Amino acid sequence: MEHNLDAFVRAVREDPAVAGFVLDFDGTLSGIAPTPAEASALPGASGVLATLAGRYPLVAILSGRRAEDVSGLIPAKGVRYLGLYGAEELQPGRPSRRRVGVGRAVLAPSRPSVGLVDEAKAFLQREALTGAEVEDKGHSVALHYRNATSPGAGDAIAAWAVDRAAATGLQLRPGKMVIELTPPGPTKADALERLIAGEGIRRLVVAGDDVADVGALRRAGELLGADALRIGVRSPEAPAELEQVADVMVPGPEGVLELLSRFA
């Protein structure tokens, strides 16, 4: 979808009451790190987001991480933190309560399957997939193979995950060098649609870099057409579909922050 970027920025700044921002974290506001625990927000990102949140009704980070984890990594006043692909939300000014939807609070989700983390670790050890690791999110289990020494680690992990998903009824969520098993739940696209409707957003900036973000960018275009600016973050691991649905491709998280700064 063609965009006159200067005109879009001007329109958003002139009518801030109906504009919003929905942003991924890993790979979008943070560089991709060797492990999830090593990720950190770009310098200055918190300040830019806080400025945006003071001007616009919706500034949200929508991540596959836990909402509380993301808020700790990139704290910014007024920002809404949605974790687990939109299954939970940490409201501004509410440091411990997660909410989904208006007026509907939910407790932290339980583990998807008793023993699944141990099963995953045993599988990696059995197959000698050195460098691959298991991340226990409580709500879900993610198998990362970015640092795996075996070139076939990704295929082996994918096959194992497909089998376990079929046996447990869990949902597969592939990403950059990771496969996650989660309970069936909302997608980022679903969460984005809920945010737009809840705040009456008529112009939206949405940014992401991974498989889960493709659907969100696509949904934004379906809902708002040219009034959505969809930013894709280019990287060697980015899915091919990302460039097909993005209006603008930037070379890295620094490009995202530069664009966001134009709206501040």
Image: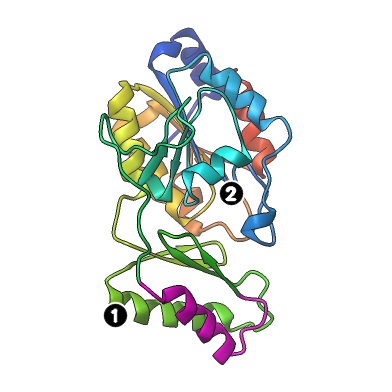
Q: Nearer the viewer, residue 95 or 42?
A: 95
125 in relation to 30, above or below: below
Mark pair 2, 1: CA separation: 30 Å
Asked if residue 263 shows in the view, the reply is: no
**121 part of magenta stretch:** yes
Q: Nearer the viewer, mark 2 or mark 1?
A: 1
The residue at 46%/77% (across/down) is: 158
**Residue 49 numbered tag:** none
In x, y percent, where is residue 109?
35, 54
The residue sitting at 55% across, 91% down in the picture is 126
Residue 239 position in % (x across, y down): 51, 58
Classify residue 181 as left or right of residue 61. left
Answer whether residue 82 is visible to the viewer in this image.
yes
- Mark 2, secondary structure of its residue: loop
In this view, the residue farthest toward the top is: 14
Look at the numbered disc 1 and give the secondary structure of its residue.
helix
- Residue highlighted by disc 1: 167
Q: Which residues are magenta?
A: 114-132
Who is closer to the viewer here, 112 or 262? 112
Locate residue 218, reporting x and y percent.
37, 44
Question: Which residue is identified by label 2?
Answer: 26
13 is higher (above) or lower (below) than 243: above
Q: Quadrant of the N terminus?
A: top left
2 relative to 253 in the view: left or right: left
99 displayed left or right of 92: left
Q: How many marks?
A: 2
Question: Hey, what amino acid is under mark 2?
Answer: Asp
Residue name at image x 34 percent, y 21 percent: 202
- Bin the neighbour count of mark 1 within 10 Å (Cα to Cα): few under 14, some 14-19, many 20 and up: few
What is the three-letter code of the residue carrying label 1?
Ala
Q: Is residue 218 above or below residue 34?
A: above
Residue density around tag 2, few if under 14, some if 14–19, many if 20 or more, within 10 Å: many
